């Protein structure tokens, strides 16, 4: 980060190559729109370049980048009044080591799960995505969302409960049966 703050394009490129996909996936998981997620990822790294001096070494760089992306996504969601069209969500990349039936079952299960996730309120969805898909600790996720750990845990509990309710009755579809 010191090298980026000093203007090193090589250091910036290394950080970008390391974290760009993670930032894009997180943004996409909140917005459900590839183009907007790409814009958010690019804006996140523009802010890294221009505001890199404000990064605090006491935290993880990836968490700081996720916090920037989260804030940008929330701004975008508010701009479009919280509406995300589930039909716009592209199919999840399949594991090519599986056979065609397994791939189709995985894609169908992922689609069902994604649809259920996009029906959750944005804060519950963000909490679940940060903790379960981006493997952030509760402390890191709370910091990224700028809330207390207790508030994050409440969002996680409500989000999990709502997700279970939304997926109730779809067990066979999720298991590929």
Image (spheres, rainbow, N blue to C red):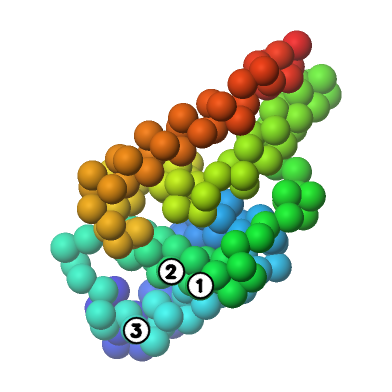
* Mark 1: secondary structure: helix
**How dense is the environment of label 1, judged by Cα within 10 Å: few (below 14), some, or many (20 and up)?**
few
Name the residue located 32 percent from the left edge and 40 percent from the top edge. Answer: 154
79 left or right, relative to 129: right
- Closer to the camera, 52 or 143? 143
Q: Nearer the viewer, mark 3 or mark 2?
A: 2
Point out the image quarter for the C terminus. Answer: top right
Pointer 1 with pointer 3, Cβ within 8 A: no
Q: Earlier in the sequence, mark 1 or mark 3?
A: 3
Name the residue located 19 percent from the left edge and 67 percent from the top edge. Answer: 57
| Residue 69 shows up from this direction | no
- Residue 71 is tagged as 2
Name the residue located 83 percent from the left edge and 24 percent from the top edge. Answer: 100
Q: Nearer the viewer, mark 1 or mark 3?
A: 1
Pointer 2 with pointer 1, Cβ within 8 A: yes
- Closer to the camera, 123 or 173? 123
- Closer to the camera, 57 or 36? 36
**How dense is the environment of label 3, judged by Cα within 10 Å: few (below 14), some, or many (20 and up)?**
few
Q: Reply above or below: 65 against 167.
A: below
Q: Position of residue 122 (x, y in %)?
A: 51, 54
Between marks 2 and 1, how big is the CA–CA gap?
Answer: 6 Å
Q: Quadrant of residue 102?
A: top right
* Mark 2: secondary structure: helix
Name the residue located 47 percent from the left edge and 75 percent from the top edge. Answer: 45
- Residue 51 is tagged as 3
* Mark 3: secondary structure: helix
**How dense is the environment of label 2, judged by Cα within 10 Å: few (below 14), some, or many (20 and up)?**
some
- Of all residues shown, which one is farthest toward the top? 177
Q: Disc 1 marks which residue?
A: 75
């Amino acid at each position: 980060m010191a090298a980026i703050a000093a203007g090193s394009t090589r250091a910036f490129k290394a950080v970008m190559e390391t974290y760009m996909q993670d930032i894009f996936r997180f943004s996409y998981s909140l917005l459900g729109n590839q183009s907007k997620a790409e814009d958010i990822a690019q804006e996140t790294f523009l802010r890294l370049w221009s505001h890199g001096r404000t990064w605090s070494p006491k935290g993880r760089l990836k968490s700081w980048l996720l916090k920037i992306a989260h804030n940008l996504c929330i701004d975008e969601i508010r701009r479009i009044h919280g509406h995300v069209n589930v039909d716009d969500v592209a199919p999840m990349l399949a594991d090519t080591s599986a056979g065609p039936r397994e791939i189709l079952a995985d894609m169908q299960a992922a689609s069902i799960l994604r649809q259920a996730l996009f029906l959750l309120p944005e804060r519950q969805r963000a909490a679940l995505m940060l903790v379960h898909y981006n493997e952030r600790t509760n402390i890191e996720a709370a910091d990224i969302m700028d809330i207390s750990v207790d508030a994050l845990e409440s969002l996680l509990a409500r989000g999990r409960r709502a997700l279970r309710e939304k997926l109730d009755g779809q067990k066979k579809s999720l298991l590929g049966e």
